[in-house]
Structures are given as C-alpha cells and as structure tokens.
Amino acid sequence: MSCPSDLIPCRDVAELVSEYLDGALDAERRAAVEAHLDRCGWCRAYLEQIRITVRVVGDIPPESVDPALERGLLDLYRKLTKDDEG
Amino acid sequence: MPSLQPSDDESLVDRARDGDEAAFAALVRRYTPMLMRLARMYVPTDALAEDVVQETWVAVVRGLERFEGRSSFKTWLFRILVNRAKTRGVREHRSIPFASVGGGSDGAGIEAEDGPTVDPSRFTSEGAWTSAPADWRDDPERSLESDEALRIVRAAIDELPERQKIVITLRDLEGLSSDEVRNVLDVSETNQRVLLHRARTKVRQALEDWIAA
C-alpha cells in the first residue's frame, strides 16, 4: 500500500499521532492528519497502537502504601494539628 | 487512566483542614504511591524517597490553612514534592531532571535526541510505510490486557530518560492534564509534548517487540 501523494507522508503522521490523540495539534495540522488517516489504514493502525499504549500505561495499578509509612504520616498529622491547637 | 474526582479531593482537603484524620488518611492513601514513584525519580534510594514524601506531607499539613484551591490540590501537592525532591537530589549530588524549575530555561537540553521516533527503515524514501503496522485491536489472546503487558510497559518506562519517564508517568499513568504537568514541572508546553511523544513511542516499541517475539 502506498500513500496518495497529495497527503503528508506517513513518516510525518507518525510524529504527530501523540499530539493528535491529545487534541494538541493546531487546526491546520489536525486537518492534515485527519485527511491522511481517512485514507491510510496503516497510519490508522499505528495511531491505534499509540492509543492502546497509552491505555496500557494507564492500567498500571497504583502501588499500596507501606503501612509503616502511613502510620508515621498519621502520627505526624496528629502531632502537627495538635501543635496548631496548642 | 485513573479517574480521581477533583471534588473528592476538595472535600477531603476541607475535612483534613478541620482536623479530620480519616480524611487526611484517605489523601495519604490516594497520593502517597504516586508521590513515592515521583520522588524516586529524583533521589537515589527508597529511603530518601520516603523522607521526601514525609517532608511533603508535613508541608501539606502546615500549608492546608493557606491552600486556597487556586490550583488543584494534586498540582499543589506534586509541586511541593518535586521541589523537595530536587533539593534532596541536589544534596545527594544527583543530576536533576527539570533542574531549571523556576528558572524557565528548560529548553536548554531536551533529551539529547531529536531524530525520528519510528525506525526510518519502516518507511520508503517518499515516507510511506514499507509494511503495515500490526492491528493491535485484533488481539485474540487479549495479551495487551495481561499482567505481562503491564510488566513490559513498566520495564519500558523504567528504561526511559528521566524527563520522559516523569512526563509519561504524570500524564498517562497518574492522569494529570497537560496544564497540570506544566504547573508541576515548570516545563514548556512544547517540551512536554515532545517528551511525552518520545516516551509513548518507546513504550509502544517495547510492546511491539514483545508481541512480535
């Protein structure tokens, strides 16, 4: 498959997909990317790979807090808020 | 992406300000893992990161009275952490990512790489793909939803240059907006976008290598 020559090349689209996903492109570049994506399944596949990458990164679960650290922080809170009152 | 309710933060902050320990505990549980992860990028050991996190919470408790909610609680909290972590990192003689906080010269050295993020051999001389990028939606084994995928992604993030690591962690893992990241790190919009793009493409590459293996 080769890209129609009236479009910006796939190589350039690949550098813009991340900003495209974030809605961070200006209107002109956004329109150029969209026109390209409309006609280029391979770039749509690449865009999807980046989209899925972002999703998987977001799926990394938060770690739990070390209970000792949490206890220490609560002790500090108690102490600090008591100091304020006193 | 994590979807923390800002309104939740606000009410917890209000209650913590009034001495409600349970509300403070909820904030600690919600944010300490992120703070640890972020602190660890600036200081060399877990123990130092814990110190920094502890200092941060102390500063938060002391500052709650003055916190007026002009920025989100999360932005305020992360900013305190980053400033403390930097101070500590400098003391430990670490080279500090985004060292110019407040200085505004972060354009000085965007990671020393500015080449393309996709292997140039994937394109013809006209810039079209030479072969199709795989369709990841067609993932019958659900491998991209597996724990192994998470492990690959975590490892790939660990390998990133510090600034890319911090930006992708804040944006895509912790779910901060681009404005919030700009406020936390004092990084320009452009640099943030470049760093995030580079980080995402490297993590994508790691997933691709793993899927192809």
Image (tube, coloured by chain):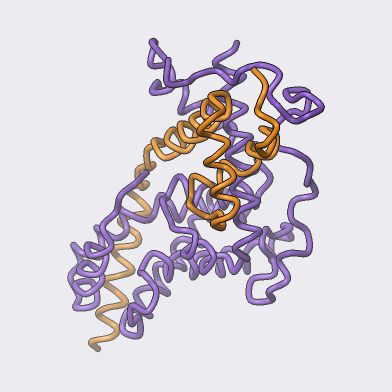
Chain colours: A orange, B purple
Q: In the displayed image of the protein, which residue is found farthest to the bottom?
A: A86
Residue at (45% x, 56% y) in the render: B35
Q: Position of residue B50 (x, y in %)?
A: 48, 55
Q: Position of residue B88 (x, y in %)?
A: 62, 65
Q: Quadrant of the image for the C terminus of chain A? A: bottom left
**In the rendered view, would you say B140 is above or below A60?**
above
Q: Image quarter for residue A28?
A: bottom right
**In the rendered view, would you say B81 is above or below B61?**
above
Residue at (49% x, 59% y) in the render: B178
Tell me if A80 is positioned left or right of B175 in this view: left
Q: Position of residue B100 (x, y in %)?
A: 69, 70
Tell me if B64 is positioned left or right of A86 in this view: right
Residue at (74% x, 30% y) in the render: B127
**In the rendered view, would you say B38 is above or below B87?**
above
Q: Nearer the viewer, residue B135 or B29?
A: B135
**In the rendered view, would you say A46 is above or below B4?**
above
Numbered marks: total = 0
Q: Position of residue B181 (x, y in %)?
A: 51, 61
Tell me if B4 is positioned left or right of B91 in this view: left
Q: Quadrant of the image for the N terminus of chain A? A: top right
Q: In the displayed image of the protein, which residue is found farthest to the front?
A: A6
